[in-house]
Amino acid sequence: MAEVVVAKAREGKFNKNAARRVRVAGKIPAVLYGSGHNAVAVEVDPKQISRILLSETGHNTIFDVEVTGQPAAKAMIVDWQREPIKDKLIHIDLKRIALDKVLRVRVRVKLLGIPIGVKAEGGILDQVLRQVEVECLPADIPGHIDVDVSELGMHQVVRVSGLPHSDKVKYITPEDATVAHVVHIREEVVATPETAEGAVAAVPGAAPAAGEAGAATEPEVIKKGKGDAEAPAGKKPEAKK
């Protein structure tokens, strides 16, 4: 049975103060539009929306939305905003859909298995695309797209063309786009007097040094404050009296 989202129509002015009052009351301001109907400003339950977004099908979940005084309609979550500090939902866009019309949606790509290039050749698996765009009928939207990477060797690549294909789902993301590949971990370099200046040894699992490029892991971003000035190289010679 499809989930039913009960949406209450909002009245009056639709500005920041009105949206803030909706959130203080424990709801989320939202807009419902699409399928030949006028857009309607509504408020919805944040717990119910969060449950849908965290489900297996996520934002591609099709559910029934009921607005007071209007017939129930099939809908999806097409956009959402979160408060950056507390990560709370602050706005939702809902779109009415017709079950007999194709949609363009983004679907998560799930990698299965451990590549040979990782187990036997010392590489790491880098997933370049975590979602791909597809076109299909609402009922045919996959919860996720699985791809087995266990046979992937060093420097081998999985492209969109290598993902499971069917007559019901059309890929919009280019077929030659890289989904995942196995790449080298940089070998550890022992510093010598000739290479010590400007060279840093790469240690697997360690955070890269400041200014180091091409590290295997994502570098940690460190923000400098105004007081982070360079210390003087040395004391000035004491003046003779």
Image (cartoon, rainbow, N blue to C red):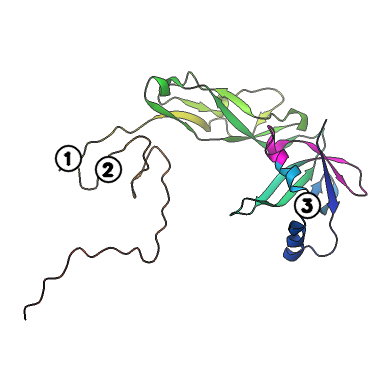
Start-end of magenta stretch:
51-75
Of the two numbered discs 2 and 3 in the rendering, the one whose residue sits closer to the viewer: 2
- Is 189 situated above or below 145? below
Q: Residue 200 carries which label?
A: 2
Q: Which mark is residue 90?
A: none
Q: Does the magenta stretch include residue 223?
A: no
Q: What residue type is labelled 2?
A: Val
Q: Which amino acid does label 1 sit on?
A: Thr
- Is 71 situated above or below 163? below
Residue drawn where x is 80% and y is 49% of the image:
32
Question: Gap between marks 3 and 1, in whole Å?
Answer: 63 Å
Query: For the residue labelled by badge 2, is the local secondary structure a helix, a strand or a loop?
Result: loop
Q: Taking 203 as reference, is 138 left or right?
A: right
Of 177 and 50, the residue lying toward us: 50
Residue topped by disc 1 = 192
Q: Which amino acid does label 3 sit on?
A: Val
- Marks 2,1: beta carbons within 8 A: no
**Where's the N terminus, which quadrant?**
top right
Question: Gap between marks 2 and 3, in whole Å?
Answer: 52 Å
